[in-house]
Image (cartoon, rainbow, N blue to C red):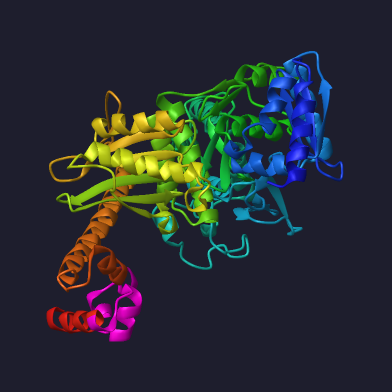
Amino acid sequence: MSESYNDRLGFLRDKANKLTLSPGVYLMKDKTGKIIYVGKAKALKNRVTTYFHSIENHNPKTYKLVSNIYDFDFIVCPSELDALVLEASLIKLHNPKYNIMLKDDKGYNYIKITKGDFPRLSYSLNTNDENAEYIGPYTSGYTVKQTVEDANKIFMLPSCNKVFPRDFKKERPCLNYQIKRCMGVCTGRFSAEEYGKIFSSALDYIRSGSKDSIERLRREMEEASDKLEFEKAAKLRDQIAAIERADRSQKIMSDKTTDYDIVALAQNMELTSVAVVKYRGGRLIDKENFYIGDEYDPSQMRSDFLVEYYSSKQTMPKEIYIDREIEDKVLLEEYFRSKFGHKVSLVVPQRGEGLNQIVLARNNASEYLSLKVGRTAKEINALEDLAKLLGLPKIPMYIESYDISNMGEETRVAGMIVYRNGRPFKAGYRKFTIKDVVGLNDYACMQEVIRRRFQHYKDGDESFFTLPDLILLDGGKGHVSAVQEVLDEMGIEVSLFGLVKDDKHRTRAIAKEGGEIQVNANKNLFSLLTNIQDEVHRFSISFQRQQHKKKQYELEITRVKGIGEKKALALLKHFKTKQGLKEASVEELASVAKINKETADRLYLYIQEIF
């Protein structure tokens, strides 16, 4: 870093060290004095000083933020709750560059209701038809389409292009009528008044949800039965049965009658997707997706999102299901209670329907993230499942895996592969030849490789600059214990586990110090770990075979008088293959091996003879 940057960092550290330990809000500013980040703190000094120490260990978002801070201001608050309220207000006011920016993934969707004596229901992306009314907007096109389809199906409304009453009795009823998917308005047997009552029931179903609709229809059915209107009662009975069938067959229905939202995140290296799924009266009524740039601490991201999203709302349900615990949970609940005037609970469901709905929301977030980053939802979910299974502090976007391969003591090598964002990152692959270990000792070889890899990091080698989120060794708990000693010795804090194979060389478990974790029950996770273990084995074996061939060539060449191991190695490094050696001229051989013409002639003839 430049001297001027270090001077600025020193100034910021000194200023931060003089701050109070009281709660408050801090405002980071760039060189023009513009506010680029607003944050809250339980203790201002403790929080702000963390920005300006060990900055090389910051996540990418914080590192970029600190690089652009030239000064900061602060406001002391009576309590942490006051700090949270003030933080939300200042973020709205200044719209700082490094606070999260919620970007909706798409436009709005509407339920279209045509005007006239025989209105229709349909899905629409706009409201530009003057001869129609609209319900909405909704942010989820899927929800709108599903709702329209359900209402038309349950109440047997027409979905054809016929115009009524103009097209009464002009043609035979279509297939939908024959299979009882349409009431058959085209037959002319329904008056506008009769149709209007059925259509009103469909609108009531859309607006109020299935449970309210069923209760109202049951009352009407009982009244019709009391009046001996059995045909009408039968139709109402069929509508009730259709609603109940739809409820049972769809995941978008809930047994809970209270209103609640579900919030879940999916992450990759550059982006986070957040899904908000909304249930009202036991029915999924809407879903929103947002993208957040610059992935950072997952707990803080969830807190930041909840504050920003609900601060802009006029109402809030009493329950919010979230997919992970957050540090500020109690504080946020207090903040929302003071803002909306009722108790709000942030719940992390562990089982049952709540957990199933969290999975549904997370799958939605993963699908939208996959569209943005070119990764499948299965790949994204596998990384999240891996983090949860291993208890990692964050999703492992950068994984390094190591395998030792040997052919006797003469050829011992190791391969290091990298999986970035759930896929192989071949630019990060590295090869190691074992130099210091005597004899066949797999643990010691792995220790040597890990020590050399992280010494490169400590020495500032740019090709080893990225610290992995997770290391996976090809081996069991013995390998893990041996390597953990090296990491502790070097002061490297990286999550470390092993990959254990079964008798058929398939990944069966993850090894940790003291035990194993089974993985074959999770298909996506099992596939990811198997691919990693197969790839690191392939890479190390390939390198080992390559090195073994070089050893064989080297031994062959050293039989020529005047060619020792060093000269043979220099020739192999330069010409790489037997064919390359065979095609080399006498002059080229002499130049590369630094030998005289007589020795070069002998070498040339020998190569032509044996190769």
Q: Position of residue 150 (x, y in %)?
A: 50, 45
Query: Residue at 65% of width from left, 19% of height from top?
Result: 333
**Quarter-of-image position of residue 301:** top right
The answer to whether one can see residue 235 in this image is: no
Q: Position of residue 406 (x, y in %)?
A: 19, 50
**Quarter-of-image position of residue 90:** top right
Q: Which residues are magenta?
A: 573-598
Q: Is residue 81 above or below residue 457?
A: above
Q: Is residue 166 magenta?
A: no
Looking at this view, is 55 or 170 the one in front?
Answer: 55
**Quarter-of-image position of residue 68:** top right
Q: Position of residue 141 (x, y in %)?
A: 58, 50
Determine whether, in the image, residue 35 is placed left or right of residue 242.
right
Query: Residue at 44% of width from left, 48% of height from top?
Result: 377
Looking at this view, is 534 or 446 the one in front?
Answer: 446
Q: Is residue 434 above or below residue 230?
A: below
Determine whether, in the image, residue 104 is placed left or right of residue 429.
right
Determine whether, in the image, residue 605 is placed left or right of residue 326.
left
Q: Is residue 591 magenta?
A: yes
Looking at this view, is 314 or 67 the one in front?
Answer: 67
Determine whether, in the image, residue 82 is placed left or right of residue 408.
right
